[in-house]
Amino acid sequence: MSLIHRLDTSSPQFHASLHTLLAFDASQDESIERATADILKQVRAQGDAALLDYTRRFDRVQADTVAALEIDRSEWLTALDGLPAEQRASLETAAERVRSYHERQRAETWTYTEPDGTMLGQKITPLDRVGLYVPGGKAAYPSSVLMNAVPAKVAGVPEVIMVTPTPDGVRNPIVLAAAAISGVDRIWGIGGAQAVAALAYGTQTITPVDKIVGPGNAYVAAAKRRVYGTVGIDMIAGPSEILILGDGSTPADWIAMDLFSQAEHDELAQAILLSPSAAYLDEVEAAIARLLPTMPRADIIRASLAGRGALIQVKDMDEACAIANDIAPEHLEISTEHPQQWADKIRHAGAIFLGRYSSEALGDYCAGPNHVLPTSRTARFSSPLGVYDFQKRSSLIQVSQEGAQVLGRVAANLAYGEGLQAHAASAEYRLTPTDTLT
Amino acid sequence: MSLIHRLDTSSPQFHASLHTLLAFDASQDESIERATADILKQVRAQGDAALLDYTRRFDRVQADTVAALEIDRSEWLTALDGLPAEQRASLETAAERVRSYHERQRAETWTYTEPDGTMLGQKITPLDRVGLYVPGGKAAYPSSVLMNAVPAKVAGVPEVIMVTPTPDGVRNPIVLAAAAISGVDRIWGIGGAQAVAALAYGTQTITPVDKIVGPGNAYVAAAKRRVYGTVGIDMIAGPSEILILGDGSTPADWIAMDLFSQAEHDELAQAILLSPSAAYLDEVEAAIARLLPTMPRADIIRASLAGRGALIQVKDMDEACAIANDIAPEHLEISTEHPQQWADKIRHAGAIFLGRYSSEALGDYCAGPNHVLPTSRTARFSSPLGVYDFQKRSSLIQVSQEGAQVLGRVAANLAYGEGLQAHAASAEYRLTPTDTLT
């Protein structure tokens, strides 16, 4: 197996090869689906008792009450105080930058009044309660706590409830510290589909939330899909992706490392470079070969690049932009001189990184924008996680007596056309020109 | 069976009774699920051929090619010209008011530059292609065409593709006229799960879209749920609901008719009035009894009110607002004096109608705000259909060389903490203080 696929858009097989490379089997595992459905049903029916039982079985944590599974705020603060100074400062800088960016996303209520006194508008309110799932064990990422909790708090959500499994009772202090920094309100040491069920349906001890966000394993993803409708959810993420457009002006080692930084996430992650320069692609390939053995996660990177990675020669940068729009990547680095001219041509991407200093890693942690981004081509129709995911809108309609005389006739007319006579009558009642009750 | 339930919040059984009344079984029909899965699979595999076959079987429309199923623009324009003048004027007024309201929802790209030259922002782009499902037959509502197509066009979507079944070849001229008025780009005379499949996956003739919106029967809803992820979808709507808060100042007949206007949609529709005045509830009940026999859709209204309707006596208006927030209704009428004071207390509702002249029917057709609203308590976490459903965001990140010196250290620090060394190295490469390539 080669180190990484090489493709060329001038080849007649190019489109078929690209299609094969991008294909990803998102089909759901039947046994996971069945197990998840059963867990949801049990927790919904039995509440606390089922939650305690599953936590005993799956996390090997013995507790007599769900209250005993709450992780007290004093413990978060202890964890925060125990962080090395530089790590704490980095977390605080990241949180502050994420907060500052997201504050610009906050929507405000607006109204306008028409000449006849009719007022129309859109009222913005935060969600009451949000549940934040944080995986336990190795995949416990404090940056993920920041990226999910901070936008919710900026939106004004009064209660952000975090759940995180504590297998064998082990609690992750950096995750607890990140929760303290990002304004989380409560933390329960529960996880898996049972935690999703508790958040969606509530139990005797846990108040149900209105939306559940955050990454998790296949059981958590299946559970979120199933409770969608009872509560809101964020997107179910596919494998992470980076697409780099390079004109050859960024050092090849930098590009190789940017590809690695995606590939090291998991063997299904996808890292692709497009360039009009064959010599540059050769240079990057050589850098990959040279740098790969130095990486602690070399095995994952190697599998990801060999299976799903590619160096693609394009005709020119315009063609590169067209391919980028077709792929609609989660992360797009435009690692070129004058990157704005190419960014202007991009219609579909989760996040666009411009110029050689904007490596995706900076966006993952601390540039400010969110690192929860649409994967698997969904950037064609969806957006990064943001404050807008934690606010919702209500239409405001206050029709004046004068306004009702016009709108009532229009509405009645259209209602008769649709055969909805009660709608028409309800509109016509408001036509009463000499209403003595006014 | 009584005409409509009477409840009183002071009763010890109130919460249980309300809960029973609100409960709605949204479980999915297994046979519909199986049939839909099969239709999606066939259209995905066979394309045009399968689409033609299903259209023959389900709509009894014989066509040799999918191209022959397209409804030509000249036919829409003929339909528009054939409308009675008053109906056409009403449709045009409604479209214009809907457009004017939705223009205020359009988001714009923003960026900001930090003192070190780092630029951050959010780029707004419309979706490329949107599919709009419009039911055929009796439930063909031109207002629904306006409410779905106008926000997409205001968002800047270049191609809005409408699909609508034409059982036995019958085409609905008001629906075609509404499409012409609202800026739809193409119309295909196809429907059912096969039309959803064609829009989501594409066929030899039909280009796939990025999002599918619009109401449909159980097969259409099941198909939309299943293609979600491949394309975006709007919410799957439950039965429609109205909740009215009344202080007694609006004529009882008006309120009765507003309840009817919800109930006439379908037997599962829900119409509820809350008032602190028992005498007023009696008056409205008497109006219901008196007016019901005069309604063309009396049977549907009677079933809806008897099964799912209620007149509820509350302690005071504050309690009414608290119940409204708990129900999170699709439509909320605050039919009182000084309605703003109560609107200020409402956190969860799809649309809020203030004052006696603001009957829901005006909002359904022509006030301006959208009539596609969150049902079944989902207003706790979701919003009316809007321009924001047809635009998406991409984060913009252009880190300056100076900025990278700070952000690179923070990112590397956090990346090491998460065990992601390629992320750290990618950030550290940008630290090079004497980069000769700049």
Image: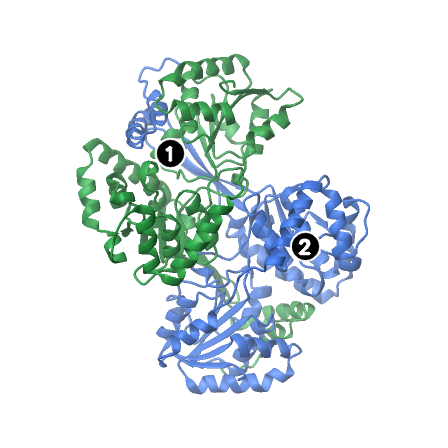
Chain colours: A blue, B green
Q: Please state if A410 lies on the left or on the right of B392 as rendered.
A: left
Instruction: Give, as a three-letter code, the residue at label 1.
Output: Asp
Asked whether the viewer can see residue A268, the reply is yes
Q: Please state if B269 lies on the left or on the right of B49 as rendered.
A: right
Depth check: give the residue in front, B27 or B111: B27
On-image quarter of the N terminus of chain A? bottom right
Task: Give the image location of residue A117, x and y in percent.
Answer: 36, 28
What secondary structure is marked by label 2?
Answer: helix
Q: Name the residue under label 2.
A: A192
Task: Give the image location of residue B49, x and y in percent.
Answer: 32, 59
Foreground mark, 1 or 2?
Answer: 2
Mark linked to residue B364 = 1
Quick check: B346 above or below A82? Answer: above
Q: How many labels does the image show?
A: 2
Cα–Cα gap, marks 1 and 2: 42 Å
Q: Crowding at label 2, few (<14), some or many (≥20) Cα neighbours within 10 Å?
A: many
Residue that sits furthest to the front in the current view: B57
Instruction: Give, as a three-letter code, the residue at label 2.
Output: Gly
Mark linked to residue A4 = none
On-image quarter of the C terminus of chain A? top left
Quick check: A328 above or below B169? Answer: below
What secondary structure is marked by label 1?
Answer: helix
Q: Please state if A164 lies on the left or on the right of B65 as rendered.
A: right
Quick check: B284 above or below A60? Answer: above
Asked whether the viewer can see residue A146, the reply is no
Task: Give the image location of residue A356, x and y in percent.
Answer: 49, 75
Depth check: give the residue in front, A99 or A1: A1
Task: Give the image location of residue A2, x and y in percent.
Answer: 53, 84
Depth check: give the residue in front, B18 or B277: B18
